[in-house]
Image (spheres, rainbow, N blue to C red):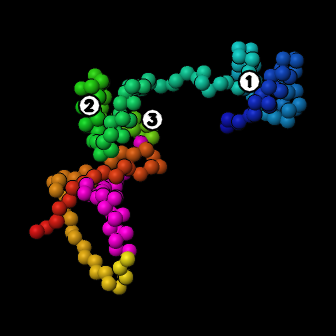
């Protein structure tokens, strides 16, 4: 038989009727429901123990194996990713071993980032290191006086100076990665 979701009011009415001595069939007729014997027993036991028919989620026991990374380890990983969004999993693993004395596999770190810290891997937004907002504003104020028909634009092709540039970084789900400065040069 499939599980049904009952409201707290319905559960309380069923338990109250049971406490008054009504049978299960009388309770089902009275409430126009189809409560099982086991459900009524569980609700009554919970009511006798806690004086409530709905359990507080904060009192639930954690099921399954305990997490390998807790509290300070999670904060450490969050700070590491925030300070360097392009960090690799093996770099996080090495830092955990060296600085926290915690040895976990790469899969554990990846699952922790995704499922517990809600951080995902995305393509990073790069910005040239020589970019200057003040110089850009000054340039735009000077060029705005010139009619657009007088302007001619050229394009420079850039080449990354790093042989292996990191193209992906970590950021919270729903947010973009921070802009990562990247040095570029032109062909000569």
| Residue 150 percent across, percent down from the top left | 32, 84
Spot occupied by residue 122 in the image (x, y as percentages of width and height)? 36, 51
* Residue at image point 67% right, 24% down: 55
| Residue 45 visible in the displayed image | no
Q: Which residue is disc 2 drawn over?
A: 95
Q: Which residues are magenta?
A: 119-144
Residue underneath mark 1: 53
Looking at the picture, does residue 90 appear above or below residue 170?
Answer: above
Question: Residue at left 25%, top 76%?
Answer: 154
Callout 2 secondary element: helix
Q: Which residue is mark 3?
A: 116
Residue found 28% across the figure and 81% down from its top: 152
Expressed as whole percent of the image width and height from the top left, the position of residue 124 reads: 33, 53
Q: Is residue 2 left or right of residue 62?
A: right
Place of residue 28 in the rendered image (x, y in percent of width and height, measured from the top left): 84, 31
Query: Which residue reaches farthest bottom?
Result: 149
Q: Look at the picture and state if 178 lies above or below 107.
A: below
CA distance separating discs 2 and 1: 47 Å
For mark 3, does the 10 Å Cα neighbourhood hold few (<14), some (14 to 19), or many (20 or more) residues? few
| Residue at the farthest left position | 188
Q: Quadrant of residue 17?
A: top right
Is label 3 in a helix, a strand or a loop? helix
- Above or below: residue 156 compared with residue 33: below
Between circles 2 and 1, the one closer to the viewer is 2
């Amino acid at each position: 038989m499939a599980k049904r979701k009952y409201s707290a009011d319905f559960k309380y009415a069923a338990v109250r009727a049971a406490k008054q001595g009504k049978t299960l069939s009388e309770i089902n007729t009275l409430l126009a429901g189809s409560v099982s014997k086991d459900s009524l027993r569980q609700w009554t036991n919970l009511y006798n123990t806690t004086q409530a028919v709905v359990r507080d989620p904060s009192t639930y026991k954690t099921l399954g194996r305990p997490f390998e990374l807790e509290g300070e380890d999670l904060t450490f990983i969050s700070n590491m990713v925030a300070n360097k969004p392009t960090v690799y999993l093996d770099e996080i693993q090495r830092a955990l071993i060296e600085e926290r004395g915690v040895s976990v596999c790469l899969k554990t770190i990846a699952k922790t980032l995704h499922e517990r810290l809600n951080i995902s891997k995305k393509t990073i937004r790069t910005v040239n290191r020589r970019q200057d907002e003040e110089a850009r504003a000054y340039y735009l104020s000077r060029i705005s006086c010139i009619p657009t028909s007088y302007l001619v634009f050229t394009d420079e092709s850039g080449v990354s100076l790093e042989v292996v540039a990191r193209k992906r970084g970590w950021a919270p789900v729903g947010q973009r990665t921070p802009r990562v400065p990247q040095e570029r040069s032109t062909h000569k």
